[in-house]
Image: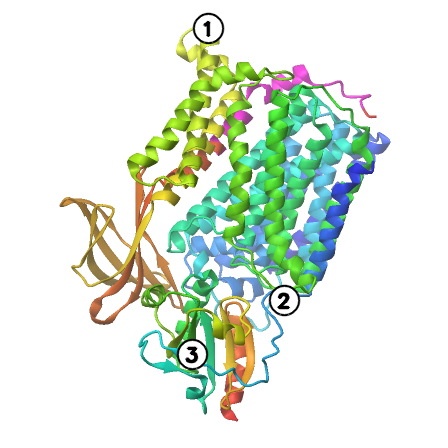
Amino acid sequence: MIPEIGHFSLILALLVALVLGSFPIAGAARGNTVWMGLARPLAGLQFFLIAFAFFCLAYAFAAKDYSVVYVANNSNSQLPLQFRIAAVWGGHEGSLLLWALILSVWTLAVGLFSKHIPDDMRARILGVMGLISVGFLLFMLMVSNPFDRLMPAALDGKDLNPLLQDPGMIFHPPMLYMGYVGFSVAFAFSIAALLGGQLDAAWARWSRPWTIMAWVFLTVGIMAGSNWAYYELGWGGWWFWDAVENASFMPWLVGTALIHSLAVTEKRGSFKAWTVLLAICAFSLSLLGTFLVRSGVLTSVHAFATDPGRGVFILAFLVVVIGGSLLLFAWRATSVGRGGKFAVISRESFLLANNVLLAVAALSVLLGTLYPLFLDALNLGKISVGPPYFDAVFAPLMAPAVFLMGIGPIARWKDAALPELAVRLRWAFAISVLTAITLPLILGNLTPMIGLGLFLAFWVFASSAELVYQRLRKSEGGLLARIRANSRSWWGMVIAHLGIAVFVLGVTVVKGFESEIAVKMNPGDVAHLAGYEFTFDGVESRNGPNYTASHGQIHVSKNGVLRTVLEPEKRLYTVTNMPMSEAGISPHLIHDLYASLGEPLEGGAWSVRIYHKPMVEWIWFGCLMMAFGGLLAILDKRYRLHAHAKNAVPKKGRSA
Amino acid sequence: MKRALIPFAIFIIMVGFLFKGLFLNPREVPSPLVGKPAPAFSLPRLDQAEKTFAPKDMLGQVWLFNVWASWCGACRDEHPILVALAKSGLVPVVGMDYKDTPLDAKQWLDERGNPYLLSAVDADGRVGIDYGVYGVPETYVIDKAGVIAYKQIGPVTVEALRNDILPLVKRLQAQ
């Protein structure tokens, strides 16, 4: 009965979304305040109905209701409760429901925190989000219903893919979706602005915190996924350029460009059309990512079941949403004014260059992801594009972007002088060049890539230090007062940029200096790596709730002093009969020690793989710094409600 | 107006490809070899380099011929499935280690288990050309008379095994 109620709740949600997607937009066009007023209550109702449907599905999982096809396919009676709940988004149908739920959360949030936005603008924004919701709810109800029944009911479920039975599964997908779907807000703001002809600094200020929020979630989501792959896949990699990873990375790149472009639009009134196009692209790439994952056009470890019917539906939806908005853009964007003028050397120029580099990087990732499909469709054969392509294309595009990051924040708006910039940054440049050459020489491995990576990281550190020093020097009072004198969004920018430097440093060092060995070990055997002794104590059997495991123990010592104990595990999940390895990791600021069990060999010996990964944690720590910087920026005073009341534009008479 | 239409035009072209892509299976390549005798070769064995393996050694049996390499990412996905298949004893699997170094390959098998009756070493990929190897991994089903009955491009999945490969193997074994 509960699944039927959930199903019914989804149907009601579709009806609500239909009304939300039509009346408020029409009301905004005709000046009908009653129709416009429908938007906020409907956003609340829609959230309630979808959340209720989600709860019904979660209940079916918790109550082990194997008469529901989706539950029977994605869980098992032995699966622990937290994974039964996470299994709600472990397959195609449920992850769509999560998508719709998160969209309704964002819609609700926009409804709640948009009192300062003119009625017509808000009605259009919520209406556009309602239309997106219509698409997803229709898709679910027509071809991907999570509540479909199984007759007769299964005795037990087929179990969740063991790869997904990990705490990462609980956080990674919801975070990632919060980011993906969050760009729908920036998208809706842009469409609303195009519809109303209201592309101005106020519009940029309203949409900025929402965009940054979505970007923060996406950053944390991608980071969590990368970290999960690192410890779960058992061979120490942290990014694979897999089609689905790319699908989440492209919106991140474009979203990053969008954040910067919005800053220019808010502060200087320039780049308006470009900003709108980026907002459309960021969300379009999120939708495209959904298409790539759901339709099976590309092979990927993340891809769910292939079904051309579903693919055609999503593609049609893409054409309507993306095609429609790009046409609207072509029609309305040309009427947008040009904004303030700026010189060739100015902060605007640097930001424009950063935007172009990020957009080209996103395009090249898109090209690499779709290239096999293009060739196949043209009958030119089958190929796969792997990490070599992406590494070759990506680094040359990102290196100048990171270099510009050191200059941009120091350059003045409108017109900056090159000699002055050179004088201000000469020490930062000297320090970073010196570090890039001497540090690898001391560590004994100087290659062009290591040199470049270290240079870029220290360039950002040093130029940020110069920036902060100058700013603090100009402010007055004690240190705390000087810190306070600069806005939170400025500090957010500094911290996010330092996060990039930390990230680059981590990537460079781990790529340049990691080492690994694979050895056959009997209990009591000792292996040596990076100055540590790894003593294998053997394995013991341990049983989990739904798996049997061989639990290994490796004592790690240096010069006879015990440092840590690694506990890698080899599990066999009983229902699916799939083996999984759980790496034993000792994370540390300086380096990770990482061990994974291979296969049991004769006589109690095991093949063991041991890695020494210097500064690998910095990769994720850098991502967290970027996210924290974004959070600080959102908390800036000027986005608070009372600040808006002062700055808000007159409510009427602004439509073009 | 015209310049502003460029993003739309690019998008429409992309949609055309995506639409076509929906009806292509990225894992399936029609092989001209299906229905033809498996190309003959004689290659050293991975475990005992002084011995060689030739397809005719398997005449009279239905067997799987799996092309793999230690450098191949998708082989990691496929490997546990092959190990489980080998344990079931339903059908022998012969491997061909493709463009690989024997040391890496042995280590790879030590770590992940060896599902293969034996592996032949195709160090320079010459035999791979005869078999039309597009990418690693690929798997061929070869019948008792040494004729290729099926080719799987990309990793063997649980579904492919259950729905296509094993039913075919049973049918061929009964012949």
Q: Are marks 1 and 3 on the same chain?
A: no
Percent across and percent down for residue A41 are 70, 36
Disc 2 target residue: B25
Viewer-nearest residue: A157 or A224: A224
Choose top left, top right, bottom left or bottom right for residue B80: bottom left
The numbered dot on residue A476 is: 1
Judge the density around disc 3: few (<14), some (14-19), many (≥20) Cα neighbours within 10 Å: many
Quadrant (top left/top right/bottom left/bottom right) for the C terminus of chain A = top right
Magenta span includes A646: yes
- Is residue A429 depicted above or below A610 in this figure? above
- The amino acid pointed to by label 1 is Glu
Tell me which residue sits at (51%, 41%) in the image. Answer: A395
Magenta span includes B40: no
* A192 relative to A578 in the view: left or right: right
Judge the density around disc 2: few (<14), some (14-19), many (≥20) Cα neighbours within 10 Å: some
Camera sees residue A34: no
| Tag 2 secondary structure | loop
Percent across and percent down for residue A107 are 65, 38
Percent across and percent down for residue A338 are 76, 24
* A34 relative to A488 in the view: left or right: right
**Predominant secondary structure, magenta span:** helix
- Is residue A450 depicted above or below A113 in this figure? below
Q: Earlier in the sequence, mark 3 or mark 2?
A: 2
Mark in front: 1 vs 2: 2
The numbered dot on residue B93 is: 3
Per the rendered image, the range of residues in magenta is A627-654
- The amino acid pointed to by label 2 is Asn
